Image (cartoon, rainbow, N blue to C red):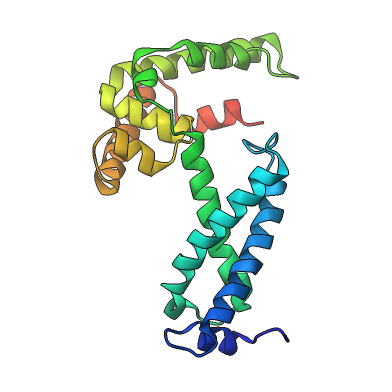
Amino acid sequence: MPERTNQEWLRDLAEGAPNRTDAIAALRERLKRGLFYYLSRERGDLADHPAEEIQQMAEDFAQEALLRILSNLDSFRGDSQFTTWAMRIAVRLVISELRRLRYRDFSLDSLVDGNENRAADAHALTIAEGDSPERSAEKREAWLRIERALSEALTARQRAAFEALILQGVPLDIVAEQLNTNRNALYKLIFDARRKLRQHLEAQGLSPEYILALFED
C-alpha cells in the first residue's frame, strides 16, 4: 500500500472511518519498529537487555503511544510528516517512562539522612584532570561551603527537593509524589530554595558567577 499523506492518516484514523482498523494497525507497526530501533540503541539501563525483552517493551510502548496519538489527533498542525509527529510523541513517552523506571526505588530520605555521596563528589572535584593543586583546593573549599549552605540555609524539605531535582536530576513528578505535593507547589519550593541559597552564599562572598567559573569544564 502506498504511503499515506498527512491528510489520509488523519482521515483514516478518525473515529468511524471505514479504514480505521487498517490505519491503526499500520501506525502501531510503524511505531513498534521505530521504538525497537530507539530502545536497541539505548546506552543506559537497557544496555544488557536481550532483544526479545526490548521487542516486548517496544510493543507495549507502541500501544500506549498509539492511544495517546489517537486522543490528540486534533493537535497535529501539519508542520512535519504525520508519522514523524507520531514518533516524537512515542519517543517522549518512552523517555519519560524509562526515567520513571530508573528512579522507581528512589527515596528522598537518602538525601535528607546521608551525606556520603556528596562527600565523594567533593573529593572527586579535588582530582579533576588538569587542575593545579591550588585550583583543586579552591574547588574543594567552595564545594564544602556550598554543602554547608545547603544544610544551614534550607529546610530539610527544601534541601531534599533541591538536591533531587537540581543535583540528581530526578524527574519532577517523582519528587512531587514523594513530597506529597503538586508541581506548582514544588516549583515554588525550589524557587524559594534557590533564593535562600544564593543569599547565603553571597553573604560569604561566593557569587553564582564565581561558582560557575570555578567548576566549568
* Position in image of residue 81 (x %, y %): 63, 78
Q: In this view, does 85 lie to the left or right of 187?
A: right
Q: Quadrant of the C terminus?
A: top right
Location of residue 70 with respect to 32 vertically, above or below: below
Q: Residue at x 61, y 50 (%)?
A: 56
* Position in image of residue 39 (x %, y %): 66, 49
Examine the rendering and report whether any part of residue 209 can be seen: yes
Q: Residue at x 53, y 86 (%)?
A: 12
In front: 199, or 41? 41
Q: Is residue 133 left or right of residue 20?
A: right
Location of residue 117 with respect to 167 vertically, above or below: above
**For residue 80, which quarter of the picture?**
bottom right
* Position in image of residue 72 (x %, y %): 43, 73
Q: Residue at x 42, y 35 (%)?
A: 165
Q: In this view, does 108 lie to the left or right of 182?
A: right
Q: In which quarter of the image is the N terminus?
A: bottom right
Residue occupying the far right of the picture: 130
Examine the rendering and report whether any part of residue 190 can be seen: no
Q: Residue at x 71, y 55 (%)?
A: 37
* Position in image of residue 130 (x %, y %): 75, 19
Q: In this view, does 61 lie to the left or right of 72?
A: right
* Count of numbered circles in the view: 0
In front: 207, or 148? 148
